[in-house]
Image (cartoon, coloured by chain):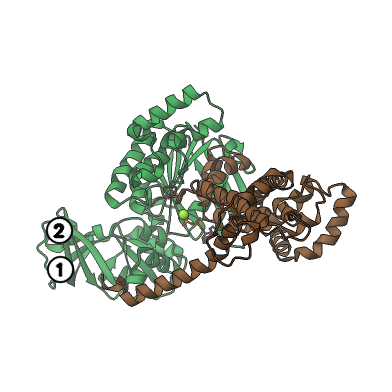
Amino acid sequence: MAEIVLDNVTKRYPDGALAVDKFSMDIADGEFVILVGPSGCGKSTTLNMIAGLEDITEGELRIAGRVVNNKSPKDRDIAMVFQSYALYPHMTVRQNMGFALKLAKTPQATIDEKVNEAARILDLTQHLDRRPANLSGGQRQRVAMGRAIVRDPAVFLMDEPLSNLDAKLRVQTRTEVSRLQRRLGTTMVYVTHDQTEAMTLGDRLAVMRTGLLQQIGSPHELYESPLNLFVAGFIGSPAMNFMAGTLAEGSLQTAIGNLPLTPALRQALERANVGRQVIVGIRPENFEDASLVKPELRGHGVTFHATIEVVESMGSDVFVYFTQESGLSAGVDQLADLAEDSGKADTGASDETVTARLDAATQIREGENAELWADVRTMHVFDPKSGQNLSLETETGTPAAAAT
Amino acid sequence: MAAVTTTPRQKAGWGTANFVVIALAMIPVLWLASLSFKTPAAVLDPSLIPSQWTLGNYSQILKTSQFIRPLINSIGIGLIATLIAVLFASMAAYAVARLRFPGKGVLIGMSLLIAMFPAIALVTPMFNIERSLGLFNTWPGLIIPYVAFGLPLGIYTLSAFFREIPWELEKAAKVDGATPFQAFTKVIAPLAAPGMVTTAILVFMFCWNEFLFAISFTSTIASRTAPASIAYFSGSSQFTVPTGPIAAAAVVITIPIIIFVVFFQRRIVAGLTSGAVKG
Ligand SMILES: Nc1ncnc2c1ncn2[C@@H]1O[C@H](COP(=O)(O)OP(=O)(O)O)[C@@H](O)[C@H]1O
Ligand SMILES: [Mg+2]
């Protein structure tokens, strides 16, 4: 049981690469925190610094109130699950799980007891005398978890522990991890590049991009009030739609029509003094089939026509895709990062495709020029240069904290 | 299916090639074995199969301490040198494969240099050094140079094996509370065991067959090794060449090496690291 404080923790690799830049975060005792971000953003490096596997270049790391910058992993009372599991191939499952206790010179009886208990929790009892090579992927994953929990550490660190499992097992194991963490009540720092995993698991998420911490918050906060373009586009599935907007006479001109501005938003935009060009973000779930919108709600949004290219019915919802001249110029690096992460850059899907999530009752068909409605109360407006979310200022009344 | 069928012509071609290679390797060995069973009078008989079989050559060499004692020396010196060389080579190879430290390039360069240095150029200075240190004609007098020449060999072979071991295993061991030394001895070394065995075989064979140092740094059977001792064989009279006993000794020397290789090869469990990471 311990809280972790990262105080401007910075990592510069010997080759000069700045992997983590001034990362600050307080992790409370028993909290389940997720580090999330695209591949290469410095998540593993941050975790390894907490574990003591990488030196901290600058800044201070405190676990349970003690500065541990120069402590070796074994003096930090942490357990870690690696992406590759890193099971010892020459040991049986039992020996793998008991290894740490054995090194700590725990009496054999206690080791047996703890290993058996962990095996019971993780449903590994009948595999205790097998070797990792003879286990399935899911079983190996559980052994790796077991190795961590027998130690009863102050902190659990997990580096993409589910990424080697197939999709179905991943969802199942995700639930187990969550249950395990609640049951043990141990502080846990969990790394993933999968925003869905992050949203479903954590108490709090820390979103990273290119070594910089973008935003820390609960899944709800990140979804509702993303501080910048990157967080807005990264959190949420399907991702937020972005299009260019021009401020003119109290409204925002965009490809889907003139979006009315609330007085508060208008004031915020004026205060921010960003010029007339902005980026508008609307989540897929804030679109609706216009014919299904209640008349009293219509006024909160705009209706527009679009030629529907693809309709995907999920049963509970219908996703429709259409193309709009987004008017976004290339060169907004946060958007470029997002495109790269989502694979858009590779598949050639254009930035101009808009995704809308409609009620299952919709009658819209592929190829139809349908009338859609977009709720503007929940739209976000971003500064195209800094990527900062300008619409947040209306909610808090204070300028959004700079993403540091 | 179609891609892997071999025509009879290809089969014949491969068969011939295999036969030639095996024959080239085996003929001298068979010839030596054949010689060792021939009587002194039949040594010049060109037939491969002795017309008259005898164990006389063997009994002659195994009766005298002139060969038995060097054989014991060979085994002792070979095993000790191998043990020391593998021990140090595994630590050095681990450092070379895993750590970034100042002087790494120098270490690799030095070991290459030793491996390439013509041993004959070292004989005279080393002879003088060994004389003044009192190492001449002792076991350590041979063990030390053997370790020195076995190390480069060992470092190269072992660092290749160490590079294959997933680094995360070591990180896991560290997180599990192991000191760097424990991580090495309890996790890395057991996984590198096949590499260590391979290295041990190579180093042992080098020590076992070494002749130049063995003949230069020894003067009596107190430390002379088996290959060197053969040079001191004498015939039944001053004018007979001891061809038969030499052949018999050569066969006897070959046997331990074969046993050593066969015995340890069984320990080389292929794919020991499988199952360590995902898969
Ligand atoms: N040992 C290393 N030496 C130099 N650069 C490294 C090393 N490890 C990682 N990096 C770099 O640091 C950045 C962050 O890496 P990492 O923390 O592994 O990212 P993530 O886990 O988020 O995918 C990457 O740009 C990567 O290339
Ligand atoms: Mg990583």
**Residue at the (57%, 59%) spot, across then down:** B34
Q: Report the number of numbered marks.
A: 2
Disc 2 CB within 8 Å of nearest ligand 1 atom? no
Residue A138 in the image: x percent, y percent? Answer: 33, 44
Q: Secondary structure at mark 2?
A: loop
Query: Which label sits on residue A201?
Result: none
Quickly name the residue at label 1. Answer: A371
Q: Nearer the viewer, residue A159 or A383?
A: A159
Q: Is residue A224 above or below residue A260?
A: above
Q: Secondary structure at mark 1?
A: strand
As drawn, which residue projects farthest toward the right?
B132
First in residue order: circle 2 vs circle 1: 2
Instruction: Give the image quarter of residue B12.
Output: bottom left
Residue A162 in the image: x percent, y percent? Answer: 37, 48
From this viewpoint, is residue A21 visible? no
Tell me the crowding category of disc 2: few under 14, some 14 to 19, or many 20 or more residues within 10 angstroms, Cα based. Answer: some
Question: Type of residue at label 1?
Answer: Glu
- The chain letter corresponding to green is A
Quickly name the residue at label 2. Answer: A293
What is the chain letter for disc 1? A
Residue A36 in the image: x percent, y percent? Answer: 42, 52
